[in-house]
Amino acid sequence: MATEDSTSAYKWSGSILDFNCCHCCPYENRLSKDLIAEAIDNTNLHILSPWDAPPGEVIGRSFSGTPTNEPELSTHWALGHPLSDLNNSKRQSIVRAFFTLIPRIAWCENAMQCGKAPVAFVGDYDSNDNLRAVLFARHLDKPPSKCREVCAFCGVFCCTGTTGFEACCSICCAPGACSIVEKFDVVDTTMKRMHKTYAPQEHLYIYVMAVLPDRQGEGACSRLMRTASRYADKHGIPAYLETSGERNPKIYERFGYAVSERTTLALRSKPDDAFDAFHAMVRQPGSLG
């Protein structure tokens, strides 16, 4: 991973201005409750609201990366060299805003389908009630359609106020904005193709698994992933996820996942600017882990 060394000490400044009118929307659905019920020790697990700021903060910090914690590498590739400095506040705000929107878009899509594609947003807390890890999962009968996602994306802009607009403005004002948009489209297109190919039937989709960089190694990821595995086993369905890099697949293999495909992300106009370690992984029911 090639990143620029910041000239100043690393700091996180990725907070965004987030005013929205959806805090009163219901979010404690059956899927979230059933997931938590499968935890061996669920005292630290709680249902999260996609409309609150802390979950987006956890995902943003995790996926943006730090000098001692690898970023989410497909996102890092999409942001490109001008935003490769992990200490860049614009980079941090883009990542935080983008991954704050993701569960909200899924929630809107689920609402449009009258609950037919339930969304679970679960957090792992420490003994001091500090959120340290987030699992975002969906129980799907098939991969989401492009049409529903577009409609949900439009709906979430009406509902979440400033976050969506700030995400768009941050990207548009970033150096290499056109390239960033093109690269995120490559990531999105690749994810949709993989999803359709390797999880065409009913499955549990692990969309995001994120742990605060300074809380890694405390067992939060293991607790959430094993809880998801028990849920999938109980329902006799596979679990599916996408991940990037060399390290992450080895982590998920411990929970019974196997790599179904490794592919390269690249723009046709810039084939030399490529990321060659994007993975689709599937866990079959009853797999070890």
Image (spheres, helix red, strand yellow):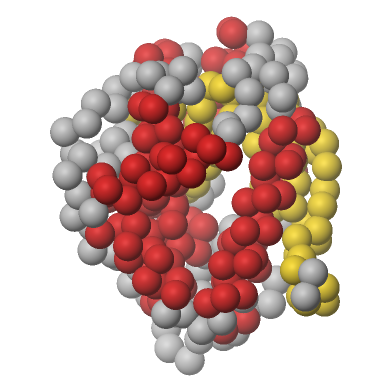
Q: Relative to 114, does residue 81 appear above or below in the rendering?
A: below
- Where is residue 281? Give x, y as percent: 74, 36
From the viewer's side, name the closer residue of 19 and 244: 19
Answer with left or right where residue 218 lies relative to residue 160: right
Which quadrant of the figure contains the C terminus? top right
Residue lying at 32% horizontally and 66% vertically, measured from the top left: 166
Quadrant housing residue 108: top left
Q: Position of residue 265 (x, y in %)?
A: 75, 60
Quadrant for the N terminus in the image: bottom right
Left/right placement of residue 263 relative to residue 68 reads: right
Q: Is residue 34 above or below residue 208?
A: above
Front-lying residue, 91 or 117: 117
- Answer yes or no: is residue 271 visible: yes
Residue 123 vs 85, above or below: the answer is above
Residue 250: x and y, percent?
74, 43
Q: Position of residue 13 (x, y in %)?
A: 33, 72
User: Residue 144 is drawn in which quadrant?
Assistant: top right
What residue is drawn where x is 16% and y is 33%?
24
Residue 81 in the image: above or below residue 47: below
- Depth check, front residue: 41 or 248: 248
Residue 264 lies in what quarter of the image?
bottom right
